[in-house]
Amino acid sequence: MNKNQQEDAKKERNKYLKENLAKIHNKIIILSGKGGVGKSTVAVNVAFDLAKKGKKVGILDVDIHGPSTAKLLGIEGQVLKSNKKGDIEPIKVTENLYAITIATMLKSPDDPIIWRGPLKMGAIKQFMGELRWPELDYLIVDSPPGTGDEPLSVVQILGDVDGSLIVTTPQDLALLDARKTINFSNKMNVDVLGIVENMTTFKCPHCGKPIDIFKGTGVNKAAKDFNLDILGKIPVDPNISSTGDKGKSYFLENAEQDSSKEFAKITKAIRKKLG
């Protein structure tokens, strides 16, 4: 490919990127300071709730090294397909829910991604600029833990992110890192919609009393220090992990459980804050 052809290809990609971004009404990035706090689980179940309410929702998984949304959404092994015009489209999960993740491009889920920053940014730009997304009410971006290449690339590529959602557990240790993601969001001029406290308590199956698995007061302190709302406190429920392992929505299959009510509460708060 000569220089002119490269320039033409670049212009075409940028054109697609602008067209895709123009079709997205609300862009939300899900952040966490450390791994294992349930960030992807929150992202997926909030997306399922929004889709159930008739909203067109897209999930963009930019956790290049540890993508998990494919498993949680039940689309492992599915590959990207082209429409009649030859445009590659994201995978349709349900009637109103679409997703793209690096996992759909791997031959095996065991294959590692060994990339440096520029390659990761290029992949994220491809996800947004070379795929034909439908018009979306919400795009939910599931980013890896921390404040590294991927969340930075998302903010730069999307340009105008409407808000971030900070997911953490009650542990003070987890909040040390979560506070960094709040500051990251502020420095990137992205409004923090609020904090989600995951794995708050566990209801004893024998006596029914709540048990604090991860004790800590950091969430309340962080919310006070940064003047943020706690949008939801999700209890520990074994069904959350079991439905996720099966690629099914916990929210849809356990609508009457306390954790599902918290997911609904979080979704309601997001919609209210974004108008």
Image (tube, helix red, strand yellow):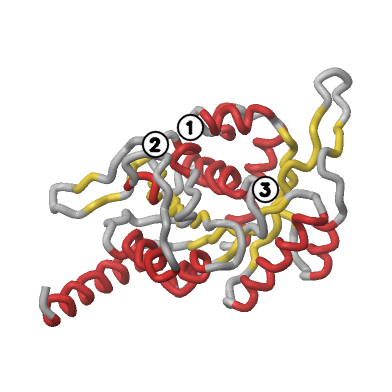
Q: What amino acid does circle 1 point to?
A: Gly
Mark 2 or mark 1: name the one nearer the start of the chain. 2
Task: State the quadrant of the C terminus.
Answer: bottom right
Residue picked out by circle 1:
247
Residue picked out by circle 3:
37
In three-dimensional space, the C-alpha distance between marks 3 and 1, rounded to whole angstroms, equals 19 Å
When the figure is inspected, residue 250 is found, relative to residue 162, above or below; the finding is: above
Q: What amino acid does circle 2 point to?
A: Glu
**Callout 3 environment at 10 Å: few (<14), some (14 to 19), or many (20+)?**
some
- The answer to whether any part of residue 192 appears in the image is yes
Position in image of residue 80 (x %, y %): 27, 45
- The answer to whether any part of residue 138 appears in the image is no
Residue drawn at x 81%, y 21% as measured from the top left: 205
Residue drawn at x 69%, y 36% as measured from the top left: 259
Residue picked out by circle 2:
76
Contact between labelled residues 1 and 2, with CB atoms less than 8 Å apart: yes
Mark 3 or mark 1: name the one nearer the start of the chain. 3
When the figure is inspected, residue 104 is found, relative to residue 208, above or below; the finding is: below
Task: State the quadrant of the N terminus.
Answer: bottom left
Judged from the image, the secondary structure of the residue bearing numbered disc 1 is loop
In three-dimensional space, the C-alpha distance between marks 3 and 2, rounded to whole angstroms, equals 22 Å
In three-dimensional space, the C-alpha distance between marks 2 and 1, rounded to whole angstroms, equals 8 Å
Q: What amino acid does circle 3 point to?
A: Val
Mark 3 or mark 2: name the one nearer the start of the chain. 3
Residue 94 location, quadrant? top left
Position in image of residue 157 (x %, y %): 41, 71
Is residue 152 left or right of 8 when viewed as pictured? right
